[in-house]
Amino acid sequence: MASLRNGEPLRLTILEAYRDEIERGITRMLAGEGPLRSLLRYHVGIENEHGQPDRANGKHLRPSLVLFVADHLGDAVDRALPSAVGLELVHAFSLIHDDIQDQDRTRRGRPAVWTLCGIAQAINAGDLMHTLAILSALESSPAAAACLLRASQEMIEGQGMDLEFESRSVAPSEYIEMIDRKTGALLRCAFELGGIAAGADDQDRAALVDLGRSVGRAFQIKDDLLGIWGRDDVLGKATGSDIRRRKKSLPIVLLFDRVDAEVAERLTQAYAPTPDAEMPDADVSWVVDQLNATDVRGTCEEMVQTHLDEASARLAKLPLAAEATSDMTDLIGFLARRES
């Protein structure tokens, strides 16, 4: 369930308003014959693994943001739609490759693409998804395609940083730089693409980018909290799952920065790369104890709130009607306080 406002569940208007247009646009871009096209339709939830119609779609957060901004700043939904679809396809491409790199066998409760067709063909599928994404964005404008390409570059660089962090110590400032790229780049791009379609001036486009940066940080830090303290029945995965996978999310980065040399040495041993082996339960429990003892969770929650406050301040700078501002405020709050 979404967060509450005045005791009532929030109606996440932004995620509902443009769903049909987005899904029609995705279906159009992924139409065609051949095994790769079928894999792409499976990955985004249009088809099941047998090629039959399905409805396993995600929230479409990023394209919804594009269309919301374009709509309320310039009545430009039609102009923005191809770039919004392109952004969603770039996000989908990244997930195909992420699952390969992380050896994750499931995605949204279904087998990951690479488990159905092998790693080599899954890489081809991801590459095709990215190509179709840029072609779609070009239908909006060359400026939109350039914006999406820059965001893709940053996202890929951020993924590279994240993988490199697995084998060395990481400073909190480095981690924030990484999430600004890996997660934040596409969220900033969503707001900017909407501004491009709406013909926003430089000042408003800068405000949109700043808003996207704050939302991206709050979103990812909340995700890091859920990866350790999320409820099993909501997430469908064990509490502490990111610890089991030895993922150096922000709570772990902060923990390394707070403990004495003896504890740091044991942490280093626990987080030493061990292919195909999860961290033992005893070590997971010990890491959680250390996190609780140093109040890392409280610090992360304060950081989420700080970025929420920044987002609210930046949202106020945009020339949006009161109702649109309220809808965006609801969505930002939901993203940072969600339970899954």
Image (spheres, rainbow, N blue to C red):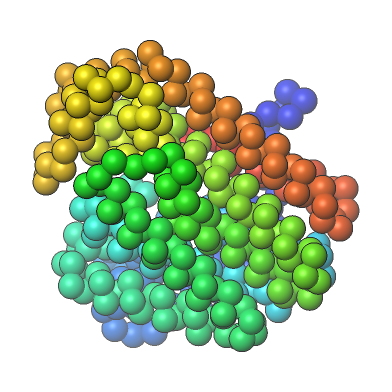
Q: Nearer the viewer, residue 149 or 260?
A: 260
Q: Splitting the image into 4 quarters, where does residue 124 fall?
A: bottom left
Q: Residue at x 62, y 78 (%)?
A: 144
User: Picture coordinates of residue 181 (x, y %)?
Assistant: 47, 58
Residue 314 relative to residue 25: left or right: right
* Location of residue 84 with respect to 165 vertically, above or below: below
Asked if residue 183 shows in the view, the reply is: no
* Location of residue 172 with respect to 196 vertically, above or below: above
Q: Nearer the viewer, residue 135 or 55?
A: 135
User: Picture coordinates of residue 200 (x, y %)?
Assistant: 79, 71
Q: Nearer the viewer, residue 39 or 219?
A: 219
Residue 179 relative to residue 269: left or right: right
User: Picture coordinates of residue 272 (x, y %)?
Assistant: 16, 38
Asked if residue 221 shows in the view, the reply is: yes
How many numbered marks are there?
0
Residue 158 relative to residue 278: left or right: right
